[in-house]
Image: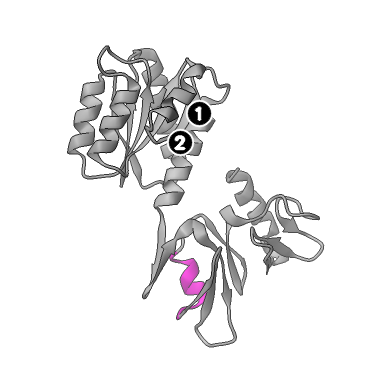
């Protein structure tokens, strides 16, 4: 479980961010929760020191005297080096200062950004993808490194193709499809693809789908067969994963 924290000294702004985060979490399958929203940086720091979980912190830079967002970020990373910080501020010139202070900021979002909810969602998606792992038997890897699963000529054997390398698994496509989350799609009876690793910019395709050859194009140039009856559903899934 990853905890999300918001620290913003203006109550109205804080509630806006709370609404964004709650809506994002409600619409997706994330192993995350909104743990705290506060105007008090000391309360946020105390939560960071006492939480056993990794945290994603959305911090205003202009907080109280003696504890601005930069200092709070440094303290949060001291509490847990796996914590991630995203800065929210109206001062765009502070971007370079944030990184110069080596606060290891994941992102920097100007409050004037026209799609601040979209930027928050990007940060949540990034942390969510980075945290997910796939394991079967003695094989374990990050989910986002997986391109696809393809049936081999051996009985009950599926080959997992990753961005770097492959691994053979003693299982079936049907059994495997029941264990995978919504990032994966059964595009053919012999193949499951990772939607996030479809090459949507591949030439002669629409969103990574080559309709003429009935294949899906993946990030490494590999292609997987696509059943005609699965095209519409894949189109829908791709539209949901923009």
Q: Is residue 237 above or below residue 134?
A: above
Spot occupied by residue 130 in the image (x, y as percentages of width and height): 43, 50
The single residue placed furthest to the bottom in the displayed view is: 154
The residues bearing labels 2 and 1 have C-alpha atoms spaced at a distance of: 8 Å
Report the disc number at residue 117.
Answer: 1
- Comparing marks 2 and 1, which lies closer to the viewer? 1
Spot occupied by residue 21 in the image (x, y as percentages of width and height): 41, 32
- Using the rendered view, name the quadrant where residue 43 is placed: top left
Is 175 in the magenta? yes
Q: Nearer the viewer, residue 165 or 93?
A: 93
Going from the N terminus, do you reach mark 2 or mark 1 first? 2
Is 212 in the magenta? no
Return the residue at label 2. 24
The single residue placed furthest to the front in the displayed view is: 100
Left or right, 48 with respect to 191, comes to left
Q: Is residue 29 in sight in this rendering?
A: no
Q: Nearer the viewer, residue 80 or 55?
A: 80
Q: Residue at x 34, y 22 (%)?
A: 69
Instruction: State yes or no: discs 2 and 1 in contact (Cβ < 8 Å).
Output: yes
Spot occupied by residue 73 in the image (x, y as percentages of width and height): 32, 29
Q: Residue at x 42, y 47 (%)?
A: 128
Q: Is residue 202 above or below residue 54?
A: below
User: Which image quadrant: the C terminus?
Assistant: top right
Spot occupied by residue 204 in the image (x, y as percentages of width and height): 81, 55
Disc 2 element = helix
Q: Is residue 45 above or below residue 165?
A: above
Q: Residue at x 58, y 46 (%)?
A: 241
Q: Which residues are magenta?
A: 170-179
Q: Nearer the viewer, residue 216 or 8?
A: 8
Q: Is residue 127 above or below residue 152?
A: above
Disc 1 element = helix
Q: Residues within 10 Å of mark 1 (few under 14, many from 20)?
A: some
């Amino acid at each position: 479980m990853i905890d999300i924290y918001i620290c913003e000294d203006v109550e109205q702004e804080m509630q806006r961010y709370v609404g964004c985060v709650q809506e994002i979490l409600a619409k997706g399958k994330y192993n995350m929760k909104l743990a705290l929203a506060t105007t008090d940086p000391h309360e946020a720091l105390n939560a960071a020191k006492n939480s056993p979980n990794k945290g994603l912190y959305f911090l205003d830079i202009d907080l109280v005297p003696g504890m601005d967002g930069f200092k709070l970020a440094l303290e949060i990373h001291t509490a847990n080096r796996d914590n991630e910080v995203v800065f929210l501020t109206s001062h765009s010139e502070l971007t370079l200062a944030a990184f110069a202070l080596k606060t290891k900021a994941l992102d920097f979002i100007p409050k004037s950004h026209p799609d601040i909810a979209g930027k928050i969602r990007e940060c949540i998606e990034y942390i969510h993808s980075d945290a997910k792992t796939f394991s079967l038997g003695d094989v374990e890897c990050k989910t986002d490194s997986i391109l696809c699963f393809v049936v081999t000529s051996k009985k009950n054997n599926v080959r997992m193709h990753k961005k770097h390398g492959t691994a053979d698994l003693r299982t079936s496509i049907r059994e495997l499809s029941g264990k995978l989350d919504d990032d994966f799609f059964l595009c053919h009876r012999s193949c499951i693809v990772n939607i996030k690793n479809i090459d949507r910019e591949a030439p002669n395709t629409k969103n990574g789908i080559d309709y003429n050859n009935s294949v899906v194009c993946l990030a490494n140039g590999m292609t997987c067969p696509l059943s005609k009856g699965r095209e519409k559903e894949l189109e829908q899934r791709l539209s949901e994963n923009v």
